[in-house]
Image (cartoon, helix red, strand yellow):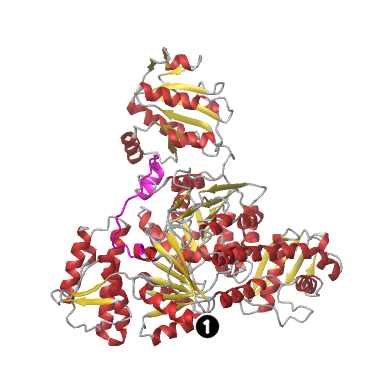
Amino acid sequence: MRNKRNIVKQVQKYFNNEIEEIDFDEFKKRHSYDRYIINTAKRLVKNYNLYRSNSIYLNDFLISFRDYLITFNVTVEIKDLDLNEHNAFNIGKDQNGYFARYQNIDYIKKNEFIKDTFLSDYKYREEKDSSNLYTNPFIYKLTTYEKFKTLSQKIAVEGALNTPNTYTSLISLPTGGGKSLVTQTMAYQREGLTVVIVPTVSLAIDQLRVSKQVIQRPNVDEEIFEYHSGVNTIDIAKAIKNQTARLLFISPEALIKNSVFNKLINDANKKRYLKNIIIDEAHIVVDWGASFRIDYQCLESWRNKLIKANNTIRTILLSATFERQTVKVLKNLFSTDNKWIEIRCDALRHEPRFTLVEARNEFDKKDKYLELIKKLPHPLIVYVSSPYDAEKIKGELNSEGIYNVRTFTGKTNEKERRLLIDQWVNDEFQIMVATSAFGVGVDKSDVRTVLHLYIPENPNQYYQELGRGGRDRLPCLSVMCLYKASDDQSTFNKVSKHVLTTEKIAGRWDSMFNNIKSHRDEYGVLIDTSIRPNYNYDDDYQVENEINNADVNWNIYVLLFLRRYNLIRIQEIQVNEGKYYFYINDINQQLLGSKGEVALNIEPLREQESKYYNDAYHLIKSAVLNDGKDCWSEMFYDTYNLVSQYCAGCDEHSRLIEYDSKEFPLKKTVCEPLISFDSHSIKGLSNNNEIIITLNENDRWDFMNRISRYNVKTLIVNDDMDSEISEYIKTSDHLNELMIFDLKTAMQLLSEGNNYYISGGVAVMYSNDEQQAYEMYRKLFRYRNTGNVKFIHIIEHDMYFESQQKKFTDIINGISVLSNFII
């Protein structure tokens, strides 16, 4: 509240010309709510200055003025502003100045959602996790992070670091959960290079910036790089050749098509300098890789070739949520010899409030969305279905006197994209009109409203787009404004053209496979994807962001389709002067008959693919049609199979729907691979399932450093050992990667069979409270004979348990007690 009062005073002084500028850095940013109210005032000042420089920006200023007045719940005097009392923004005036109170919009079913999202009465409550969130000496020295943000982040990061060579780990962590720490820690876990594949230039730049801030290394500028078109490759190439580079953020296109990087990565790999391949926003491999960004699914053969030469490479697939079908495709593409791990901390977003606005016709829709854009909380993103619609909405807003608006679509070039994202993040404008091309990698945390003027093609697309809002974990709005009859037909037309007809798939396969340009050898066929099909193809469908050469795009679509259904194997992809050549083998017999026979064999698979797209669309269509009857979170619950239902508000109900508040964040058991451990390395443990070590407080942490060298990766601690753990993490000279769990978390992992986290040699450290110590041992006792765990009990002295009339050593039957322990 003090921040609010001080900001209000400064803003009023600024409007009265008592100060020349406001130093917003002087205000405390203790949490996300502080940052939001500071940014609200910043936007007001920027738009006021814009208006003073040119009066045509009056309405842009009034939008930010209204947001400020409602959020801060204040009255402001501005002497040089003469505003009509019947203005379009519901800004009033009395003897004290201008004011705005939220007023209901007639056609909004749940106006309380909008009022809540202005955050005028919001009281910030920091979410507290009762679990032990301590990191370990390695992460602390690298980042100075003593604790993880959440238990989900702890499980995700430690699970990633535990990934064995050649394995692929698919990791989901909710938006805002800190999955970038996976990338940062893996890059410095071992000497070598980590390549991070990112979908957008903005994400690469942002990841570079954040990583350099987080990683506490003196030579970080010579170790972390990002590449996009226009970046000088000299420094990157030098660092990779000299083996000083640790992190490289890059697009799939650059890896597949850029000969410089192709050679750099291959050479590094031959020397086993390449350690990790990380695909960020990995759902895009499936969502985009089958159509306009084909290089995403070309990564499979690129990776396989690298692994053949270097079996130490680990692969990590990161995203906030994964659909069933997405996981199935990713496993098919990136699992080597079934070396596959899923670390699933999926959870639905807690921030969005959902509401639908229905229009009677196109004219009514226009009137409503123009009012919504003026009166809903900002910053605000308007999502539309095409570049044409984006420019049209921008023009309509200009006609309403709103000029400080930008568009971001598939037609926006790379240079413009970078500039737009920088301006958006820096609050140079507050309304973005965009297609689905905008979103991924845009780290603007305080977007308050996402307005859809079309029906997305499936719940996943909708979820990704609405996910641009509320990334600061504060309430946000997801509003759809639709003329259902027209918008439904428009989206259905796009969905129905996602999959080529069976005849065209078979025809394009026949055209490529049997063409004289396709060179055969005893192992397979090299296919030139620029071959034109031998049928009339004028009506083939092109999506918005499709590459220019339609024949190449659709030919590659066919080959990737056949690969996804395991009818061929893609051994290698070569790109020469922009032309793609696929070397394929293991061609299924179903593809070797006549064109008619091939069509018959492909038909069921084509139907399966078509059904997937249609079913997904009908799921979101059903939510729209049944608005007010069904909870909107149900379509996400049906889409993402490992989430629990959560809805902060929609048109169906007025109470919170929350089923995930007390759930353990790891939603799927990770039973293997087990942690490798040689029990012979610790005297007395090889023939027993548990031993006791008696050590004083100073020696036992040194002992943990020593046994961690022998792959003892898990430590279970009592709840009252915070100060000891903190001291150990900060002062240990051994940068070990212990997973430190409190008893509650350990029991949850053990009870559900998560041996990936707790197996091999497991250290258990007890406090001197005898009752707590006995309770701890009693709970762990049942797991000592599972064959997966060897317990190393670390105590300061041989405690006597009154309830059992026994000492600790008596409970552990006949096992040696080693005081002067020798490894």
**Label 1 Cα neighbours within 10 Å, binned few <14 / some 14-19 / many ≥20:** few
Q: Which residue is mark 1?
A: 388
Locate residue 444: give its quadrant. bottom left
Let me know if residue 262 appears in the view.
Answer: no
Q: Residue 712: x, y in percent?
A: 49, 33
Q: Residue at x 39, y 78 (%)?
A: 371
Q: Residue 764: x, y in percent?
A: 44, 29
- Work out whether 735 lies above or below 289: above
Whether 319 is among the magenta residues is no
Q: Residue 411: x, y in percent?
A: 52, 79
Residue 442 horizontal side relative to residue 15, left or right: right
The N terminus lies in which quarter of the figure?
Answer: bottom left
Whether 117 is among the magenta residues is yes
- Element marked by disc 1: helix
- Work out whether 199 lies above or below 80: above
Magenta stretch secondary structure, dominant: loop
Let me know if residue 31 appears in the view.
Answer: yes
Residue 374 horizontal side relative to residue 540, left or right: left
Residue 680 horizontal side relative to residue 331, left or right: left
Locate residue 754: give its quadrant. top right
Q: Residue at x 58, y 52 (%)?
A: 641
Q: Residue at x 44, y 50 (%)?
A: 185
Q: Which residues are magenta?
A: 116-143
* Residue situated in front as seen by the camera: 391 or 371: 371
Q: Find the residue positioned furthest to the top.
A: 805
Q: Kindly identify the amino acid type of the residue bearing the numbered disc 1.
A: Tyr
Q: Residue 696: x, y in percent?
A: 34, 24
* Residue situated in front as seen by the camera: 168 or 526: 168
* Residue situated in front as seen by the camera: 319 or 240: 319
